[in-house]
């Protein structure tokens, strides 16, 4: 079974190849447009540097949904940290009292238990946060892989595409989620 790091490396490779292809086509288009500008007899309107299909005009639905999930998890994490700090402040106030009664002491124990529960829950969600962050980094690559391979017969899929599909499946991004369930 391939490691998480291997998966991210494969997906980063796909992104790098895509960027190289875009840079190459950009530099070729710029060279061509520059030579055409010098040889034109009428005013020249420069064509787009990249074909329309490679330039996203908007944020993809997959990326938007992954960003939404990550933002929501981050917001919940920050709210938990604020709750923990507020409860710790209550404990400090109770500790500052000269002679707290028995009910106050019981409240302090309950607050400490709640703090421990929140910290434990927050620690358990760290792996989920890391997974969401990783998904956010590669969601566009997985969406591209999905779009290029979904209509292919399994015999026509290359070994590299097969490995990338498996990597995206391990990150639960094949098929990509768009939030339109």
Image (cartoon, rainbow, N blue to C red):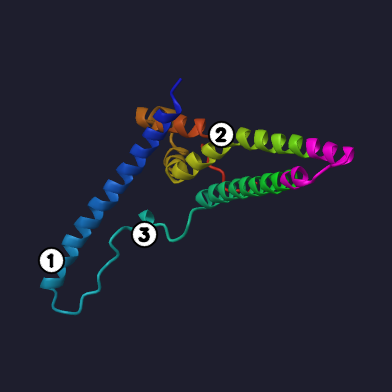
CA distance for labels 2 and 3:
38 Å
Q: Is residue 135 left or right of residue 93?
A: left
Rendered location of residue 87, percent (x, y): 72, 45
Placement of 5 over or under 61, stated as above or below: above
The residue closer to the viewer here, 123 or 151, is: 123
Q: Which residue is mark 1?
A: 35
Disc number placed over residue 127 in the picture, else none = 2
Q: Which residues are magenta?
A: 92-110
User: Which secondary structure class fits the magenta region best?
Assistant: helix
Q: Which residue is mark 3?
A: 52
The residue closer to the viewer here, 61 or 41, is: 61
Rendered location of residue 70, percent (x, y): 56, 46
Q: Residue at x 78, y 44 (%)?
A: 94
CA distance for labels 1 and 3:
22 Å
Is residue 136 visible from the viewing direction of this image? yes
Q: Is residue 134 magenta?
A: no
N-terminal of the pair, mark 1 or mark 2, is: 1
N-terminal of the pair, mark 1 or mark 3, is: 1
Mark 1 burial class by Cα count in 10 Å: few <14, some 14-19, many 20+: few
From the viewer's perspective, is the residue at label 1 or at label 2 nearer?
2
Q: Are marks 1 and 3 in contact (CB under 8 Å)?
A: no
Q: Secondary structure at mark 3?
A: helix
Q: Is residue 60 left or right of residue 160?
A: right
Q: Is residue 99 magenta?
A: yes
């Amino acid at each position: 079974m391939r490691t998480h790091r291997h998966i991210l490396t494969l997906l980063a490779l796909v992104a790098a190849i895509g960027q190289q292809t875009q840079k190459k086509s950009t530099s070729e288009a710029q060279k061509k447009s520059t030579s055409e500008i010098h040889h034109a007899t009428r005013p020249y309107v420069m064509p787009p540097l990249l074909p329309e299909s490679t330039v996203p005009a908007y944020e993809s639905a997959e990326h938007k949904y992954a960003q939404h999930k990550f933002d929501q998890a981050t917001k919940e994490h920050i709210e938990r940290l604020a709750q923990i700090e507020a409860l710790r402040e209550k404990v400090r106030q109770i500790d500052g009292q000269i002679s707290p009664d028995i009910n106050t002491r019981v409240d302090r124990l309950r607050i400490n238990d709640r703090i421990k529960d929140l910290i434990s829950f927050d620690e358990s969600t760290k792996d989920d946060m890391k997974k969401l962050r990783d998904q956010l980094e590669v969601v566009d690559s997985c969406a591209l892989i999905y779009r290029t391979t979904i209509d292919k017969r399994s015999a026509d899929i290359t070994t590299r595409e097969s490995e990338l599909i498996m990597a995206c499946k391990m990150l639960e991004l094949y098929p990509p989620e768009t939030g339109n369930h």
